[in-house]
Amino acid sequence: MPAKKKTELIESADVLPVDKPESSALSEVGQIMQSAIAQNASIDTLERVMRLYEQSQTIVARHQFNEAFSRFQQEMPVVKKNKTAAFNTNNGGRMEYSYASIDDVVAAIQPVLH
């Protein structure tokens, strides 16, 4: 049985709203679709208009994601490396490095992610 996930509600006054998509491109495609329907356009034409609409939505969604991810990266705090790992290598040497625990990474990311 999988472990139950612990979820916490994090309230923050610094939460930034996600930008709404630019409606001009989407409304233009909508107008083209309405015009094509009004003129009894063929299925092929309607499908092409629909593909154009979907492509424009994909572009807007990609732009929104990139903007949100950029803000996330700017607000993300530095996560301190508080753990150490060490092991012997195949050629008889020793390797050692520091890393941040997953709990610390999650704790640092969650407030910014929300």
Image (spheres, rainbow, N blue to C red):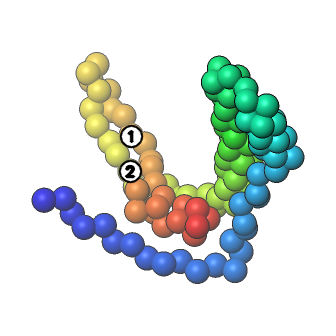
Q: Quadrant of residue 34?
A: top right
> Which quadrant of the view contains residue 4?
bottom left
Label 2 is placed on what type of residue?
A: Thr
When the figure is inspected, residue 98 is found, relative to residue 108, above or below; the finding is: above
Expressed as whole percent of the image width and height from the top left, the position of residue 63 reads 74, 42
Residue 74 x %, y %: 73, 55
Residue 84 badge: 2
Report the residue at 39% width, 40% height from top: 96
Of the numbered discs in the image, which one, if any, rests on residue 96? 1
Towards the viewer: 72 or 51: 51
Label 2 environment density (alpha carbons within 10 Å; few <14, some 14–19, many ≥20): few
Residue at the (58%, 67%) spot, across then down: 114
Label 2 residue SS: strand
Are the two marked residues, 2 and 1, in contact with CB atoms closer than 8 angstroms?
A: yes
Residue 59 appearing in the image: no
Numbered disc total: 2
Up-down: is 106 above or below 70?
Answer: below
Work out whether 25 lies above or below 81. above
Amino acid on which disc 1 is placed: Glu
CA–CA distance between discs 2 and 1? 7 Å
Quarter of the figure that contains the N terminus: bottom left
Residue beneath the point at 76% across and 58% down:
19
Identify the residue shown where x is 19% and y is 59%: 2
Q: Is residue 18 visible?
A: yes
Question: Is 39 situated left or right of 15 in this image?
Answer: right
From the top left corner, tell me how far across and down residue 65 is, in percent: 67, 47
Disc number for residue 11 = none
